[in-house]
Image (cartoon, grey):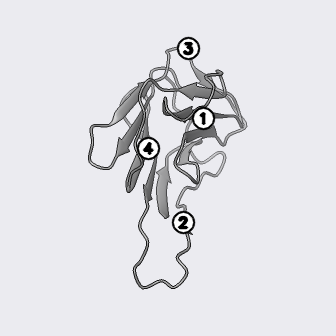
Amino acid sequence: MACQGSIRGPVFVEFDQDSKYVGVKNLSDKDQPMGCWELQIQVDDKQPIIYKFLPSFTLKAGETINISPSDNGADHNLPTNLVLWKSWDPANKLVATLLCSSGEEMAKTKVNKTIEADCDHPADLITHENHYTPGTAQLASP
């Protein structure tokens, strides 16, 4: 499995190791207003699953919300767990994109589940290109 991503600001998105949920994490020491932001989950080449955060939603400093498909077995328990009304099938390619209320891409993570044929012992190849240094990015407001 290979992962790569990008981030603009303090909010980071990533799939868990088994791609059973997407974690949206505030890496900052300040609360992040995310009202009307969208999380788009692209499964292979299918239409994206889109979740729009409520206008009043704020992701607390250092906190994570895990967003799971309906068939995951997770409990809907806000503000830490959100279960979507849709499910995503096992896929070779997953992309999670977080857009702020103006439509600007704030974070993106891609997962490709491919195994190289010439590997004797296939291992997960995980590289993250997500960087956030406090004070270098302006917090987006809703």
Q: Mark 2 or mark 1, which is nearer to you?
A: 1
Which residue type does callout 3 highlight? Answer: Ser
Residue carrying label 2: 127
| Dot 4 amino acid type | Ala
Horizontally, residue 111 falls left or right of residue 43, namely: right
Residue at the spot 40% in from the left edge and 43% down from the top edge: 89
Mark nearer the viewer, 4 or 3 = 4
Q: How far apart are marks 2 and 1 (CA)?
A: 21 Å
**Residue denoted by label 1:** 66
Residue drawn at x 39%, y 80% is 117
At mark 1, the secondary structure is: strand
In the figure, 109 relative to 36: above or below? below
Mark 4 and mark 2 residues within 8 Å of each other at the beta carbon: no
Between disc 3 and disc 1, whose residue precedes? 3
Foreground label between 2 and 3: 2
How many residues crowd around disc 1 within 10 Å: few (fewer than 14), some, or many (20 or more)?
many
Q: Which mark is residue 56?
A: 3
